[in-house]
Amino acid sequence: MDTHFNLGNALKHLGRLDEAAASYRRALQLNPGFAAAHNNLGATLKDMGRFEEAAASYRRAVELQPDSADAHNNLGTALKELNRLDEAVASYRRALQLNPGYAEVHGNLGNAYKELGQVDDALNSYRRTLQLKPDLPEIFSSLLLTLNYTASQSTAECLAEARRYGQLVSGKASAPFSSWNCDPEPQRLRVGMVSGDLCNHPVGFFLEGLLAHIDPARIELVAYPTCATVDALTRRIQPYFSAWKPLLGLSDEQAARLIHADGVHVLIDLSGHTGRNNRLPVFAWRPAPVQASWLGYFATTGVAEMDYLLADRMGVPEEHRAHFTETIHYLPE
């Protein structure tokens, strides 16, 4: 039983999810009351996008270990993916009753509140998370995104919060690059794009409309997707890129070193603080000599190493340029 469970853990770590699920199921055949196996099977099914099955596994883990904050938190996460938000909130609250100092659960609860449109509750949950665990860039991103849906803070206060995020991620980049492998006078500019939305998503659709107009003799594109989604749109845009290099499973430092080794001249973020797959901390390592944010987010990233935000004068009027840590580079209408 333990051998099958441990094998499942190893296979999950390797990303061999079907095999991992099979190992956990074999362990459960031998011991149906093995709560940890139900939990880890749920985590594997969640990673596979099979959220109904994941929720069933987590629910069984909760039944076996009703006092486990982890189990309630995991169940809440599966329920949120199923858009059963009120049930997710109830699971997260139960987890916090069991462990009030569980920082990640406060963050997950904030995400559920945000989806429910309960903005003040979401902001309170994110701030509680950061009080307990200040070094969570992904929660800080959620806080910054959610601030755009409230008038409770001034523009100056929102900018100050974004700068604090930038200081956090810059502090984690222990040795940012100061020289680069790219040719300073290239015949062809190499441009990298970092995004979790190179798929059936508004960013993907807008990007698709642009890619066909880029001259590959002048500009070489390299994609750095940050999520595993591959759909029809993904397959349509892939041929426009000379390389497709997912950043999944890579630390921020590893991702930065990969991009730096590729000799990218300009690195473009297409996410800002949106989604669960933004990799803004990678930009704090400055893997490219020129870095810009575009398309996926409408406010400042707060990252000092992000040189530019690409916009037009309608998206960022002249009088709003001071609300950004980036230099606003206006594109033609």
Image (cartoon, rainbow, N blue to C red):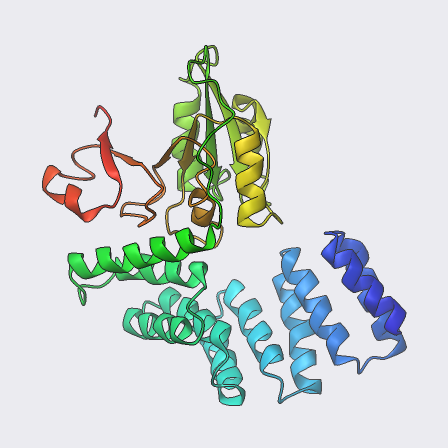
Rendering coords of residue 147 (x, y %): 27, 61
Q: 63 or 319: nearer the eye?
A: 319
Residue 105 can be seen in this image: yes
Q: 172 or 68: nearer the eye?
A: 172
> Which quarter of the image is occupied by the N terminus?
bottom right
Please tell me which residue is depicted at 56% across the width and 76% down the height of the picture.
73
Q: Is residue 8 found left or right of 263 in the rendered image?
A: right
Rendering coords of residue 107 (x, y %): 44, 70
Q: Is residue 7 found left or right of 130 in the rendered image?
A: right
In the image, is residue 270 above or below residue 52? above
Q: Is residue 16 found left or right of 241 in the rendered image?
A: right
Please tell me which residue is depicted at 47% across the width and 42% down the height of the picture.
197
Residue 227 can be seen in this image: no
In the image, is residue 142 above or below residue 112? above
Total tally of numbered discs in the picture:
0
In the image, is residue 180 above or below residue 8? above
Which image quadrant for residue 228?
A: top right
Q: 211 or 277: nearer the eye?
A: 277
Rendering coords of residue 250 (x, y %): 60, 47
> Which quarter of the image is occupied by the C terminus?
top left
Please tell me which residue is depicted at 43% across the width and 47% down the height of the picture.
280
Please tell me which residue is depicted at 32% across the width and 45% down the height of the picture.
304
Which image quadrant for residue 35?
A: bottom right
Rendering coords of residue 208 (x, y %): 44, 28
